[in-house]
Amino acid sequence: MELAKRVKNLPPYLFVQISRAIAEKKAQGIDVISFGIGDPDIPTPNSVIETLKSASDNKINHRYPESEGLPVLRKNISEFYKKRFGVNLDPETQIINLIGAKEGIAHAALCFIDPGDIAISPDPAYPVYEIGTMFAGGKCHMVQLRQENGYLLDPTDIPTDVAKKAKVLWLNYPNNPTGATANLEYFENLVLFCKEFDIALLHDACYTEVTYDGYVAPSVLQVNGAIDVCMEFHSLSKTANMTGWRVGMAVGNSEMVNALMRVKSNIDSGLPQAIQQMGITALHLSKGWINSNNEIYRKRRDKVVSVLNQIGVHTNPPKAGLYIWTPVPKGYSSSQFASDLLEQVNVVVTPGNGYGLGGEGYIRLSLTIPDDQIDEGLRRLSQFRIKG
Ligand SMILES: *Cc1c(COP(=O)(O)O)cnc(C)c1O
């Protein structure tokens, strides 16, 4: 038996290494505080769980769902986009329901990338943009996100011959891992760039509802004419603490959405209908619920930023997302700093280079652990001594 190159060449999944380090510590009887994985610790709202309970009794939901998803969920997504972003979407042709955004992001590559094709990806980035491209036989041209640019992918960093050849450009704002945000003017610029070079603009918008200090994140589809070249990915995972339930969506250009639907209908049979019903309830969570959920993260953010600055790790609070992204002190690499933290004070953080070479020199801390663990983690961090 021989495995395919696409499997053999896979880098080890970042969090597998972290889990291993934690397991080794545990085996020595040491309990570790992990700021590693981004997965909301706050439970799914009750109203959403109640929806699942009653939907599970309905025998209609015991059968195969439709690949493109329940029309009523698509209609609710369209209403959400209208209300939240002022964007009009046709539920029949411009929206598809996903089993979480991740599968849609990975499968999108199969819609645009033939063997040898190029996709443009930010670096650092959510690893699925690059791996999805690789699975489709393509290659990613990585564009470094620079701190001095506010981690906005700068299209003038893309060589013209690459732009001419590229099929796809990935963006993600609010950004994981950097916490960066983009305004509408920035999106306008990138839509023009993609139109000029006939590139599909794929925007991962999973964090638009997780924002702080009054910041409101735009959708790329608010740009006039964006619908000609864009598909946007959304998810209820982070918005509504639903990572365990898997509700995502892709919206935008109808030809692009249709291509994704055709790919997916040959791979999966859609999102369980009872879970689609949960999605409908979650899309109607009140502004008040969203605000108080974000307020929990905002308090954690402020505590973490303050302790990092205290120990000499200079950090600014992000306006969105679930992560603190910060440069490591001088003289450390990402992984040296992360392993020193684990050795000295039994705290796990994610080394930035796990998100691409462009993340070297940074670490990421996730805000998705319970408050008592955050407090204990910060107590430990405050005892950390930077070398030399
Ligand atoms: C969490 C996350 C996703 C995946 O969301 P799911 O809907 O849970 O699959 C996609 N993109 C980014 C940047 C994320 O951080």
Image (cartoon, grey):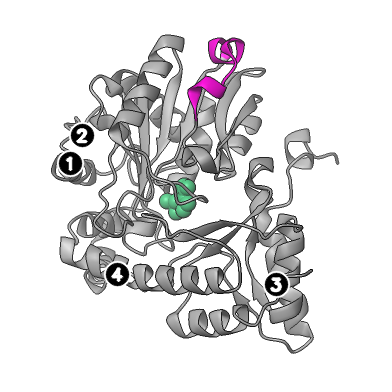
Could you tell me the amino acid type at mark 4? Glu
Amino acid marked by disc 3: Leu
Q: Give the image location of residue 271, x and y in percent.
A: 37, 49
Residue occupying image coordinates x 31% and y 32%? 220
Question: Earlier along the polypeptide chain: callout 2 or callout 3?
Answer: 2
Callout 2: SS: loop
Q: In the image shown, does 215 or 171 lie closer to the viewer?
A: 215
Kind of residue at badge 1:
Lys
Is 353 placed left or right of 87 in the picture?
right
**Residue at disc 3, secondary structure:** helix
Q: Which of marks 1 and 2 is nearer the N terminus?
A: 1
Label 1 with label 2: CB-CB less than 8 Å? yes
Magenta-colored span: 154-165
Q: Give the residue type at disc 2.
A: Pro
Where, by quadrant of the figure, is residue 280 drawn?
bottom left
Instruction: Give 306 or 227, whichever is nearer the viewer.
Output: 306
In the rendered image, which residue does mark 3 sit on? 341
Residue 153 lies left or right of residue 212; in this view the side is right
User: Is 143 above or below relative to 166?
Assistant: below
Q: Kindly indicate whether the residue at mark 3 contacts the one at mark 1 (C-beta within 8 angstroms).
A: no
Mark 2 CB near ligand 1 (8 Å cut): no
Q: Circle 2 sits on which residue?
A: 91
Query: Which quarter of the rendering shows the C terminus?
Result: bottom right
